Image: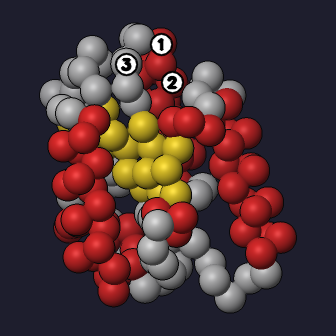
Amino acid sequence: MLDYTIKTLVILPHLDDEFALAPLIGKLKHEGCKGLKFVYCAERYNDDEQRNLKRREENLKSLKLFGYSKRDIIYLNDFFTVEDLKLYKSLNKINQFLYKLTKKHCFKQIITLNFEGGHPDHDALAMLI
């Protein structure tokens, strides 16, 4: 059962995956969830830098609709490389990063997407979490 009053970490495989949790993200904000942070893992490195920046801008706009800001978002690719469709190659680094982040910010619950048996990045992250 979710607790809307405790510090929560939402970790998602890609920059557009928050849409799958839109009702939940809205409820977390509405219920006053404090200390909510979003971590995004994989990004496309075969695209040019402008397209990647545009995706981040769109991601920020999406979360701003719920009342969140840039300070609430962490992109793992600012720390180490997590390639789209190859998230599984970075599982150890992701695990270490999340452990330190959770310890530092005292997150009490973590939310991610379900294992779906489809997209390899979604499934790898679901298994890790």
The residue where tag 2 is placed is: 26
**CA–CA distance between discs 2 and 3?**
13 Å
- Which residue is the site of mark 1? 30
**Which residue corresponds to the image point at 33% horizontal and 40% vertical from the top-left?**
9
The answer to whether residue 3 is above or below residue 129 is above
The reply to whether dot 2 and dot 1 touch (C-beta < 8 Å) is yes
What is the C-alpha distance between the residues marked 2 and 1?
Answer: 6 Å
Viewer-closest of 75 and 129 = 75
Are there few (<14), some (14-19), or many (20+) residues within 10 Å of tag 1?
few
Direction from residue 45 to residue 72 in the image, left or right: left
In percent of width and height, residue 83 lies at: 50, 81
- Give the SS element for disc 1: helix
Q: Position of residue 86 (x, y in %)?
A: 43, 85
Pick the quarter of the image with the N terminus.
Answer: top left
Q: Which residue is mark 3?
A: 34
Seen at 68% across and 28% down, the residue is 65
Would residue 86 be found to the left or right of residue 57 on screen?
Answer: left
- Per the model, the C-alpha gap separating discs 3 and 1 is 11 Å
Which residue is most to the top? 31
Asked whether residue 50 is in view, the answer is yes
Q: Which mark is residue 51?
A: none
Q: Position of residue 17 (x, y in %)?
A: 52, 54
Secondary structure under the numbered disc 3 in the rendered image: loop
- Find residue 34 and report its horizontal and vertical position in percent: 37, 19
Q: Residue at x 22, y 65 (%)?
A: 96
User: Looking at the picture, which amino acid does disc 1 mark?
Assistant: His
